[in-house]
Image (cartoon, grey):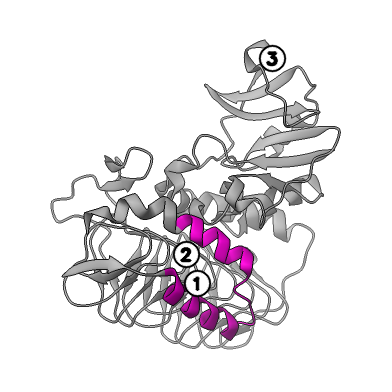
Amino acid sequence: MNYILFDGQYRDALLPLTYTRPVSEIRLGIFTIREKWEMFTSTTITNLTEDYLSHKFPMVEFPDNIMINGAYLPNEDIMSIIEKMSSNQAIFDNDTVVAFRVSNIQDSVDFDSLDKLKCPESVLRIKNLCDIYRLNGEAIISDFELLTKNKNSQPIPDGAQCIDEELIFIEEGAKLQFCTLNASDGPIYIGKNSEIMEGSLIRGPFAICENSIVKMGTKIYGSTTIGPYCKVGGEVSNSVFFGYSNKGHDGFLGNSVVGEWCNLGADTNTSNLKNNYADVKLWNYESESFINTNLQFCGLILGDHSKCGINTMFNTGTVVGVFANIFGSGFPRNFVPSFSWGGNKGFSTYLTKKAFKVASIVMKRRGCEFSDKDAEILKEVFEISKKFRSSY
């Protein structure tokens, strides 16, 4: 059976993170959503996504295909339904299509003619940006159980102080030096060749992926994920780093999502709670307006390749697009469009020629290449996001 993840109706609500990736490439818990489905199906899975992304994320079509909404996470309950699903059936979450079977993806599907199967309530799904950090703890717990089943952890090194050691899993090559790990509220996963430096205090649920570093004296609260090849310091609470991003110094980050290739300058601080304790409003690309999250806690959403200078202060519920460069005193506004250059005193357009030059240097430092495919995707994002920069 061939499985294909499609973006579905929540794709625009997950911008700016989905400007540069299919929905299923969002990291939630330890893995991306696609990686979770690959573990459950024991096969390689491709994406049906926006045309401009398809060159980097190509779809592979077979004579018989199971199409799955990339915003939905796998578990045993939904897998048992999918494995028995016939071509005249589809799984629905109210009016949202979750999964169906098709022989020719290019043909239109009459969903009204299909037998409707109910999506299990136990299935996690991300419908908006806040769901990524809000559901991260549950996702870490599920991924931890799946990943560590019938596997043995590396021994906990001398000097590391641990609570509930049975919920701490250490991969090969990881380094832990005189840190404190508390798994009483959820498991702690320490990925291959990662490092937690001395003096760090960490509470679960927590995951640090391969080759990432937690710097000296860092304080991390659950439910937090540090994706691969990141460097994180300071104070972090209930946040998700997708990968290849840095918050290497003091400063607070809470209830936030940080994309790839981002950098937070020293002493960057994010407000995650309003002074009047009111619900936080967050920029929504779909409606092109601020909408109520119905949440008291919401910090920063930072798109890929965006960076901020030292002492940057982000207001509660700030959304920053792709390739923004923020600096200067004061609070920047709560929505910073993609390819913006500036801060509290105003913004100008960050031209692709300059932005791509920086990206090439940054990625080369990590042994990666800023490819022609990356450039083409980001040129498209530059054009798509142009209307949001018209307010400069």
Q: Which residue is mark 2?
A: 304
Q: Earlier in the sequence, mark 1 or mark 2?
A: 1
Identify which residue, 3 or 166, lies in the foreground. 3
Q: Residue 207: x, y in percent?
A: 56, 66
Question: Which quarter of the rendered picture does the C terminus lie within?
Answer: bottom left
Q: Which residue is mark 3?
A: 114
CA gap, disc 1 to disc 2?
A: 6 Å
CA gap, disc 1 to disc 3?
A: 43 Å
Is 199 placed left or right of 93 in the picture? left
| Occupied quadrant, residue 213 | bottom right
Is 275 placed left or right of 148 in the picture? left
Residue at 58% in and 45% down = 50
Q: Earlier in the sequence, mark 3 or mark 2?
A: 3
Secondary structure under badge 2? loop
Secondary structure under badge 1? loop
Q: Which residue is mark 1?
A: 261
Q: The magenta stretch spans which residues?
A: 352-381
What is the chief secondary structure element of the magenta stretch?
helix
Q: Is residue 377 magenta?
A: yes
Query: Are there few (<14), some (14-19), or many (20+) residues within 10 Å of tag 2?
Result: many
Residue that sits furthest to the top in the current view: 113
Task: Kindly check if marks 3 and 2 are in contact, taking CB atoms under 8 A apart as contact.
Answer: no
Task: Kindly check if marks 1 and 2 are in contact, taking CB atoms under 8 A apart as contact.
Answer: yes
Residue at 26% in and 54% down = 390
CA gap, disc 3 to disc 2?
A: 39 Å
Q: Is residue 290 above or below residue 116?
A: below
Identify which residue, 170 or 54, lies in the foreground. 54
Identify which residue, 196 or 52, lies in the foreground. 52
Question: Which quarter of the rendered picture does the N terminus lie within?
Answer: top right
Q: Residue 364: x, y in percent?
A: 59, 83
- At label 2, which amino acid type do we have? Asp
Q: Residue 330: x, y in percent?
A: 16, 72
